[in-house]
Amino acid sequence: MALFTPSFSFKISASSSPRRCRFVKSPRSFKLRAAVAVESPSFSSADRDGAPKLLLEVKDLSAVIVESKQPILKGVNLTVHEGEVLNFRLITQSILLFLWDAEGGLMYFVTIMADKEIEVHAVMGKNGSGKSTFAKVLVGHPDYEITGGSITYKGQDLLEMEPEERALAGLFMSFQSPVEIPGVSNIDFLNMAYNARRRKLGLPELGPIEFYGYVAPKLEIVNMKIDFLNRNVNEGFSGGERKRNEILQLAVLGAELAILDEIDSGLDVDALRDVAKAVNGLLTPNNSVLMITHYLRLLEFIKPTFIHIMENGRIVKTGDISIAEILEREGYKAISNT
Ligand code: ADP
Ligand code: MG
């Protein structure tokens, strides 16, 4: 299981305000100088009885292609839980300040570490088994019509929600083949999407300059140059750049459930490592991941809690990483139901 250790810290400065004092020992008077430094995680991921909360519950889901009525999903069952806080650890550190002609004293740093287990689900399966269709149905793609079953997301009937509402409720999907949006720059697109999320949260929108300040550091996460922001969305991007751009969107928008469809396809080893590192870096206490992949190599970077095998529109097997190892060695016939 993936163990994840987010932390937040705050510092309390203790100062005795001596002037021209080189060295200050334990001061008597304390002054609160700084508060929470990093966004604090929400610790509401477990029910009152301590059981992890359901994030997504898919039951007997069937779907057909709208145009042809061809059945693709034929009874999918899958459950994803929210992450679970295992325990808290307090780490206290103090440093002495040596400030000439200024306030000196002791500075205390208190870091609260929350050890969490987050669920990372991997869906594997032969080409054409319905993996991408399943992912697209979750985000409300109009090509598919639901013909049976249910999807509950954070206690709500997901099928009753419009695709935009699903996105605003924290469902994010990176597409296997991200589309170009001619005439719309990456930064405008991200700014628009991010402001929609902020409006939903009752927060003020960010103007272009503020947004630039927010997005620029995120480029580092995906190892992208700043000029990517001014290019039109995915226009002329290589396969690897498109994948990085998808992860940049995830970094900007955040997600409670990130659905990543073949983020490893078409990537060389270095790009794969970058993208996997970025995804791992984005995993916060409040999100879970559903990723579709063919390859063990991605799962060695982003460790899955569960692996599901999809076959002919159904999940036919669920297990741990050993399933992927068998697959890699012996192919799908070794785990196939047919
Ligand atoms: P996977 O991602 O597992 O490779 P897909 O979900 O993309 O599989 O596709 C499952 C099957 O459904 C394939 O045979 C595919 O051609 C078909 N399919 C999916 N979406 C469409 C669509 N919009 N129009 C026509 N056929 C589709
Ligand atoms: Mg696919």
Image (spheres, helix red, strand yellow):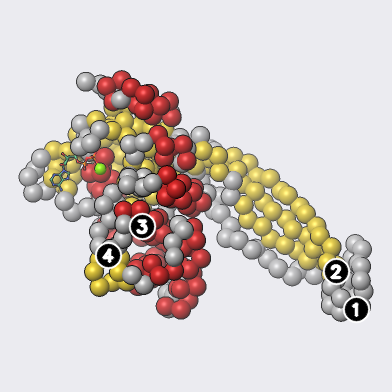
Mark 2 or mark 4: which comes first in sequence? Answer: 2
Q: Amino acid at mark 4?
A: Glu
Q: Nearer the viewer, residue 248 or 48?
A: 248
Name the secondary structure under disc 3.
helix
Q: Nearer the viewer, residue 333 or 83?
A: 333
Mark 2 or mark 3: which comes first in sequence? Answer: 2
Q: Is residue 51 visible?
A: no
Mark 2 or mark 1: which comes first in sequence? Answer: 1
Residue carrying label 4: 235
Instruction: Report how far apart the C-alphas of labels 1 and 3 lie in the structure.
Output: 55 Å
Give x and y (percent) for residue 209: 46, 79
Q: Quadrant of residue 167?
A: bottom left
The residue located at (25%, 59%) in the rendering is 179
Q: Residues within 10 Å of mark 4 (few under 14, many from 20)?
A: some
Residue carrying label 3: 241
Instruction: Report how far apart the C-alphas of labels 4 and 3 lie in the structure.
Output: 10 Å
The answer to whether the residues at label 1 and label 3 have Cβ atoms under 8 Å apart is: no
Q: Which mark is residue 19?
A: 1
Which tag is nearer the camera, tag 2 or tag 3?
3
Residue carrying label 2: 98
Split into 4 quadrants, where in the image is the C terminus? top left
The answer to whether the residues at label 2 and label 4 have Cβ atoms under 8 Å apart is: no
User: Does 142 appear above or below 58?
Assistant: below
Instruction: Report how far apart the C-alphas of labels 2 and 3 lie in the structure.
Output: 47 Å
Q: State left or right for residue 211 relative to residue 49.
A: left
Q: Nearer the viewer, residue 155 or 178?
A: 178
Q: State left or right for residue 93 relative to residue 133.
A: right
Q: Amino acid at mark 2?
A: Phe
Mark 1 or mark 3: which comes first in sequence? Answer: 1
Which quadrant of the frame does ligand 1 lie within?
A: top left
Q: State left or right for residue 139 relative to residue 112.
A: left
Q: Is residue 322 visible?
A: yes
